[in-house]
Image (cartoon, rainbow, N blue to C red):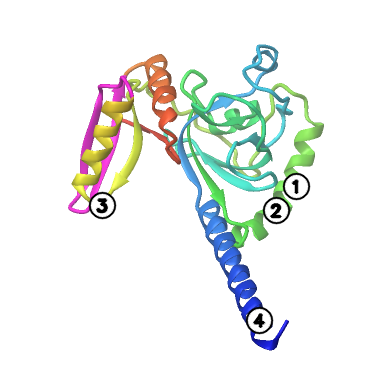
Amino acid sequence: MNFKKILLLSFILLCGCNQINKNEKSFNFIIDRYSNTGFTLIYSDQLKKNNRISKKIDNRSLLIFHKKIKKGSFVKITNPINSKSIIAEVISNNAIFSDFYNSVITNRIAEELSLDRNEPYVDLVLISNSSSFIAKKAKTFDEEKKVAEKAPVDGITIDNLGVVEKKVTKVKKQKFLYSIKIADFYYKDSADNMINRITEETNLKNYMIKKLSKTKYRVLLGPFNDIKNLEESFNEIKSLNFENLEILKDV
């Protein structure tokens, strides 16, 4: 093989490696920014027994199942109703459960967030590994996890030192009203094309386009006033393989 051929082969291999690195960076960037708003599934042994969840999880822990975030990642879970939030770790990303739920959380997390168990609605955001937040919280999380593992399954509480009295705030029951966010578009024509696709490929009728600004048009399904119809519509629209469907409250 002469020098020119060797040089050409080296150039091709170098370009290929650069392309792989670019793809890897792009993939990591997307995962790094993951967030989703929707319903979570609160783990119970009965759900496992009924095959609604494929794996067991320690209900005392600050751990979750998630389908898209890799194992070992940290997420911030927030209850939008009362703004309470907690940091949890993804213990598995291959557990099987309904796609309608953006995660499976433990009973402890549900208690800490004061979630409505009939309407467990949460914001879930991946905490980037490059974030200084991880470095600050990792040690605290590990210590808290050890405490939780030794605690009884029922009645887990965390005391705040220095707080003499806690006010019990009654949360007013809100009307069930949710919509499914399909996607946001820069152009109105693109949003119209998405509506045409939904019309042609599904039996869904309750779609709409919401203008958020001159350059942002949101395609939504809904609103829904009961969780059964919401879940049925969600399962039908997911057949179109959208990247990250979200459930929005009172839009």
**Which mark sits nearer the N-terminus, 4 or 1?**
4
Q: Amino acid at mark 3?
A: Tyr
Q: Nearer the viewer, mark 4 or mark 1?
A: 4
SS assignment at label 4: helix
SS assignment at label 1: helix
**Contact (Cβ within 8 Å) of mark 2 with mark 3:** no
Residue 170 badge: none
Name the quadrant containing residue 246.
top left
Check disc 2: other Cα within 10 Å, few if <14, some if 14-19, many if 20+: few
Residue 142 badge: 1
Q: Which residue is mark 4?
A: 5
3D distance between C-alphas at marks 4 and 1? 56 Å
Q: Which residue is mark 3?
A: 186
Span colored in magenta: 202-224
Q: Nearer the viewer, residue 194 or 160?
A: 194
Q: Amino acid at mark 2?
A: Ala
**Contact (Cβ within 8 Å) of mark 1 with mark 2:** yes
Q: Which residue is mark 2?
A: 138
**Which mark sits nearer the N-terminus, 2 or 4?**
4
The residue drawn where x is 64% and y is 16% is 47
